[in-house]
Image (cartoon, helix red, strand yellow):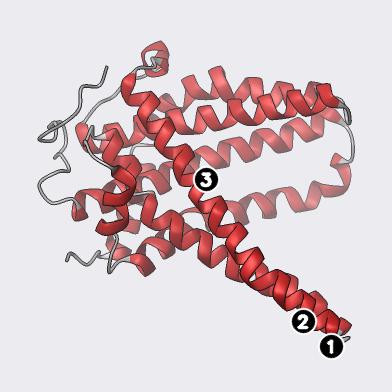
């Protein structure tokens, strides 16, 4: 069993994102224009209520998710196989891209199931027990407790299963979720901390930037779009670090499977 050097891998992910920031921007730009920008426009056009508004909002979310997943795949392909696609070529969708998106959806479904499990097994029984005991003063604490437990549960599950995504990016064959779960054994804490440390700094930065302008945003469309655009840009930066961390973790854990830069893995699937 390989034990990850957590701090080294996380530092490498941040350094790579900074050193290759121009390449990150070049890889993110096609997805920003093709998927994320339409998501922002749909958010601005969506009415505040009604079926049409819900449909536009859902379409916007799907566009944003497609943009993030497309960029994550291209960035991990660059790290693991030395592939550097930009422009329209980066938007090409084939078997590899569909497989990557499918596995990402499965990961999110399982993470969602972990969230529901935390709600059913912890939040609801605790809330009912406190209500039965008339301990209403403690009910507010259950929300905070649930959020903490749910964050740990979801982060732990995501950290183990997200190793499947760089494996798919490297065209490794097999039941990737099961393989990823087994590979993460002994490194659950490091993968969880890597997930948090990749995302939290950008979330805090976004909050620091947005907080002074919270009152100015209100219900006006232009400030809302500006805030959403900032969130998208910081999201791409955070995703570059997160995807880089898991790509390096995959390379360390998948002995004999993860390619060196520019080298295809053994037993690889056809990309198309």
Q: CA distance from mark 2 to mark 3?
A: 29 Å
Q: Earlier in the sequence, mark 3 or mark 1?
A: 3
What residue lies at 68% left-to-right and 55% top-to-bottom?
A: 208
Q: Position of residue 106 (x, y in %)?
A: 45, 41
Label 2 sits on a secondary structure element that is: helix
Q: CA distance from mark 1 to mark 2?
A: 6 Å
Q: Nearer the viewer, residue 144 or 247?
A: 144
Residue 96 sits above or below residue 112 on the image: above
What residue lies at 37% left-to-right and 19% top-to-bottom?
A: 86
**Residue 133 — which label?**
1
Name the quarter where the N terminus is drawn. Answer: bottom left
**Residue 109 — which label?**
3
Where, by quadrant of the figure, is residue 268 drawn?
top left
Q: Residues within 10 Å of mark 1 (few under 14, many from 20)?
A: few
Left or right: 44, with 259 as reference point: right
Instruction: Check whether the beta carbons of the residues at disc 3 and disc 1 lie within 8 A of each other.
Output: no
Name the quarter where the C terminus is drawn. Answer: top left
**Residue 129 — which label?**
2
Q: Position of residue 83 (x, y in %)?
A: 25, 26
Where, by quadrant of the figure, is residue 19 drawn?
top left
Q: Position of residue 228 (x, y in %)?
A: 70, 36
Query: From this viewpoint, is residue 49 visible?
Result: yes
Instruction: Check whether the beta carbons of the residues at disc 1 and disc 2 lie within 8 A of each other.
Output: yes
Residue 235 sits above or below residue 102 on the image: below
Residue placed furthest toward the top: 88
**Residue 235 — which label?**
none
Q: Earlier in the sequence, mark 2 or mark 3?
A: 3
What residue lies at 32% left-to-right and 25% top-to-bottom?
A: 96
């Amino acid at each position: 069993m390989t034990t990850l050097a957590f701090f080294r891998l996380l530092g490498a992910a941040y350094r790579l994102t900074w050193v290759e920031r121009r390449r990150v921007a070049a890889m993110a730009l096609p997805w920003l224009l093709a998927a994320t920008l339409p998501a922002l426009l749909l958010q601005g056009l969506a009415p505040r209520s009604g079926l049409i508004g819900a449909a536009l909002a859902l379409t916007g979310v799907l566009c944003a998710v497609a943009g993030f997943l497309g960029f994550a795949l291209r960035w991990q392909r660059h790290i693991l196989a030395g592939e550097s696609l930009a422009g329209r070529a980066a938007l090409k969708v084939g078997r590899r891209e569909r497989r990557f998106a499918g596995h990402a959806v499965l990961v999110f479904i399982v993470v969602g199931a972990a969230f529901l499990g935390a709600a059913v097994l912890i939040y609801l029984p605790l809330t009912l027990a406190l209500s039965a005991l008339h301990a209403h003063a403690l009910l507010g604490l259950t929300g905070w407790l649930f959020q903490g437990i749910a964050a740990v549960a979801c982060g732990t599950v995501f950290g183990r299963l997200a190793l499947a995504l760089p494996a798919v990016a490297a065209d490794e064959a097999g039941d990737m979720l099961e393989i990823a779960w087994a590979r993460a054994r002994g490194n659950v804490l490091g993968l969880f901390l890597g997930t948090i440390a990749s995302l939290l700094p950008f979330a805090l930065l976004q909050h620091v930037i947005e907080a002074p302008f919270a009152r100015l945003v209100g219900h006006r469309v232009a400030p809302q779009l500006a805030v959403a655009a900032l969130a998208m840009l910081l999201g791409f930066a955070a995703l570059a670090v997160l995807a880089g961390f898991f790509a390096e973790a995959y390379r360390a854990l998948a002995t004999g499977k993860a390619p060196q830069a520019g080298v295809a893995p053994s037993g690889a699937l056809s990309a198309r």
